[in-house]
Image (cartoon, rainbow, N blue to C red):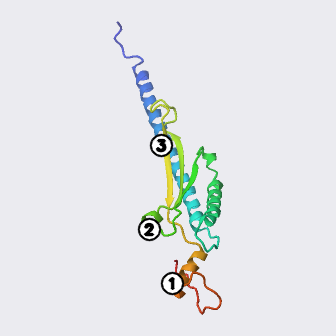
Amino acid sequence: MKNNQKGQSTIEFIFSFIFAVSLILLVFTTSMNYTSGYVTHYATYMASRVYLTQDSNQTAWGPGSRTQAFAEAENTFKDFKLEVFGINAVFGINHNDELNLDAGKYLMVGTYATFTRKMDVIGRVTGQTELELISESFLGREPTRGVCASRVCKAISGEDICTNSMDITLYDDGC
C-alpha cells in the first residue's frame, strides 16, 4: 500500500463543493418561497382593499353588494398575474351573512389565497414535500353609502329611509 497524499485535496474539494452548492440552493429556494409569499400577500391585500371598499350604493347590505365587490376583488387579484412567478393561487373571500356582526366576526371579513411551493429545488433533501401557504387579509368590510345613510337617518329621525320632506343633513362620520 502506497502511503502518499496525492489526490486528497481533490476529494476534499468535491465534498466541500457539494456542501456549498447545496447550501446555496437551500438559501435560494427559501428566498424564492419568501418572495412568492410577499407577492401573493400583496395581491391578496390589494384585492381585500377593493372588496372591502367596493360600493354599490345599495341601501341593503346584502348579497348584491357582495357579488359586485367579489367580482372586482377577483379581477384585482388576477391583474397581478401570479402565474408568471409560478404561483397557482386559489383566491377566496371570507364573509358573513349576518347584518349585526359582533367585533370578532366583523374583523374576519376579507380575502385569502392559498398556494403551494416546493420546499427544495432538487427534491433530494426533503423529497417532494410541498408547503401549503396561505395569505390572508381580513380588515373588516365597510358598509355601503346607502347602508350608512340609512343608519344615520334612523339615528336622527327614527325612520330607515330619509325623504326630501325631512329637514336633515346626512353627515357621514365613517358609520
Q: Position of residue 74 (x, y in %)?
A: 63, 57
Q: Which mark is residue 102?
A: 2
Amino acid beneath label 3: Thr
Position of residue 39 relative to residue 28, above or below, is below
Few, some or many C-alpha atoms within 10 Å of disc 1 (few <14, some 14-19, many ≥20)? few
Element class at badge 1: helix
Q: CA distance from mark 1 to mark 2?
A: 19 Å
Amino acid beneath label 2: Asp
Between discs 1 and 2, the one toward the N terminus: 2
Q: Position of residue 127 (x, y in %)?
A: 47, 31
> Front-most of 43 and 90?
90
Q: Which residue is mark 3?
A: 30
Of tags 3 and 2, the one toward the viewer is 2
Q: Which mark is residue 155?
A: 1
Of all residues, the one furthest to the top in this rendering is 1
Position of residue 80 relative to residue 22, above or below, is below
Q: Position of residue 49 (x, y in %)?
A: 56, 64
Q: CA distance from mark 1 to mark 3?
A: 54 Å
Quarter that holds the N terminus: top left
Res 161 quadrant in image: bottom right
> Front-most of 68 and 35?
68
Image point 37% across, 17% down: which residue?
5
Few, some or many C-alpha atoms within 10 Å of disc 3 (few <14, some 14-19, many ≥20)? some
Q: CA distance from mark 3 to mark 2?
A: 39 Å
Relative to 9, 137 lies left or right: right
